[in-house]
């Protein structure tokens, strides 16, 4: 069935804003400016400040929810399902997982390329699938196990591409690239815990997705903003690139913004894009399907990679292309996109029946109305 103009708009909005989200974060990392107290020029290495901006974008989804709710209540026949009443503190544990994972990923983005960052986030499928078996009692279908294995192969190829390119890349040390890759994969373990917590404790209350994203954004924004205070005094040595070598120097970030106003544009791009990305992702799930949302999320990796190449942020590596294709194949197999093709081949039709013994609806619930990407989506 052909898509409507509105569905095409939503798909385009999700693809565009999702790509802008990662690209704007990487763009901010590439700025250099003087800091406070006449410090010499240094890179804008403030991952936790960026994470606060990301949560502010998610928090804005709560305002969008109430605007839509007020508009709906003024109509003659209200149609908006607000869900059951719930304790907002239910969102606190997944919000803390989101805060931790997002902060780790922004640290990693300083160490590796934007395309590798986006590709390696595909590891969330592996850990979410395994944790759903362990803690939600799910039974993965044959295609989902196969998708997990293919995704692992894709991650190995992407890691190998970074290892090879790390010897030739002057902008990142090989040790930093590999550390960044490992941090991204570690963050996906935390994201998968977040998704399982949301599935187990949150979505059974039938909470509106915009309200869920906004509530988690509120908790993440408040807690991480408060944590910036002790981070200002925690010395971490060479692990940090700011002049004082502390975990996060928010004052230095604001001073750099004052000396280089374009950083504000990059940070606003990150904040605004995450809000629209969440809205578009939720709408795509509602208007089309969760599987379409997953495919679009994979395609934004291609957009990010192409833009990074065009801007000269990274060099072309054939292994990275192979890794992307393998990861895309793993995502497609996991989500059952192979079924229409196999159903047309008489000798392979039985494989579709075996795959469908699992529960595709479970995948819809786990990946459909959940989060981005950042998470940010992100």
Image: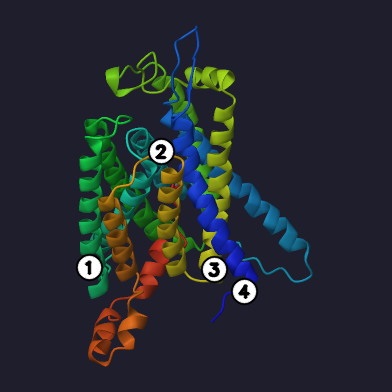
Is 323 left or right of 285, judged from the image as shown? left
Res. 351 visible in picture: yes
Against 232, residue 167 (above or below) is: below
Residue 333 location in percent, x, y? 30, 70
Determine contact: label 1, label 4, CB under 8 Å.
no
Q: Which of 347 and 235 is in front in this view?
A: 347
Of helix, strand and loop, which one carries label 2? Answer: loop
Residue 353 location in percent, x, y? 28, 86
Q: Identify the disc placed on residue 313.
A: 2
Of helix, strand and loop, which one carries label 3? Answer: helix
Mark 2, Cα crowd under 10 Å, few <14 / some 14-19 / many 20+, is: some
Res. 208 visible in picture: no
Which-is-in-front pick, marks 1 and 4?
4
The residue under the point 64% across, 51% down is: 64
Against 245, residue 177 (above or below) is: below
Determine contact: label 2, label 3, CB under 8 Å.
no
Q: Identify the disc placed on residue 4.
A: 4
Q: Which of 54 and 295 is in front in this view?
A: 295
């Amino acid at each position: 069935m052909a898509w409507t103009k509105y569905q095409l708009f939503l798909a385009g909005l999700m693809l565009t804003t999702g790509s802008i989200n990662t690209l704007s974060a990487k763009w901010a990392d590439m700025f250099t400016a003087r800091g406070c107290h006449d410090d010499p020029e240094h890179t804008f290495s403030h991952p936790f400040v960026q994470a606060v901006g990301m949560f502010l974008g998610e928090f804005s989804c709560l305002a969008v929810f109430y605007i839509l709710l007020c508009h709906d209540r003024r109509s003659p026949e209200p149609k908006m399902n607000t869900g059951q009443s719930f304790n907002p503190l239910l969102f606190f544990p997944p919000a803390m997982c989101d805060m931790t994972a997002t902060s780790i990923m922004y640290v990693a983005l300083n160490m590796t390329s934007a395309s590798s960052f986006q590709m390696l986030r595909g590891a969330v499928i592996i850990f979410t699938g395994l944790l759903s078996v362990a803690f939600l009692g799910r039974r993965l279908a044959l295609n989902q196990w196969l998708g997990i294995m293919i995704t692992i192969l894709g991650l190995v190829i992407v890691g190998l591409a970074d290892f090879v390119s790390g010897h030739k890349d002057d902008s990142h040390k090989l040790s930093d690239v590999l550390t960044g890759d490992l941090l991204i994969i570690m963050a996906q373990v935390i994201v998968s815990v977040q998704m399982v917590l949301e599935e187990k404790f949150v979505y059974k209350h039938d909470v509106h997705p915009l309200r869920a994203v906004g509530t988690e954004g509120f908790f993440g924004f408040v807690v991480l903003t408060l944590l910036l205070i002790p981070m200002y005094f925690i010395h971490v040595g060479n692990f940090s690139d700011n002049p004082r070598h502390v975990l996060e120097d928010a004052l230095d970030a604001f001073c750099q913004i004052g000396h280089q106003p374009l950083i504000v544009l990059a940070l606003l791009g990150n904040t605004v894009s995450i809000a629209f990305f969440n809205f578009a992702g939720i709408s795509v799930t509602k208007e089309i399907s969760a599987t379409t949302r997953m495919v679009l999320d994979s395609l934004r990796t291609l957009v990010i990679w192409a833009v990074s190449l065009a801007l000269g942020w990274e060099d072309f590596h054939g292994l990275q292309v192979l890794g992307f294709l393998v990861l895309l194949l793993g995502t497609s197999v996991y989500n059952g996109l192979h079924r229409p093709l196999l159903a047309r081949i008489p000798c392979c039709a039985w494989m579709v029946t075996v795959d469908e013994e699992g529960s595709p609806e479970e995948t819809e619930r786990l990946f459909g109305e959940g989060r981005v990407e950042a998470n940010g989506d992100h």
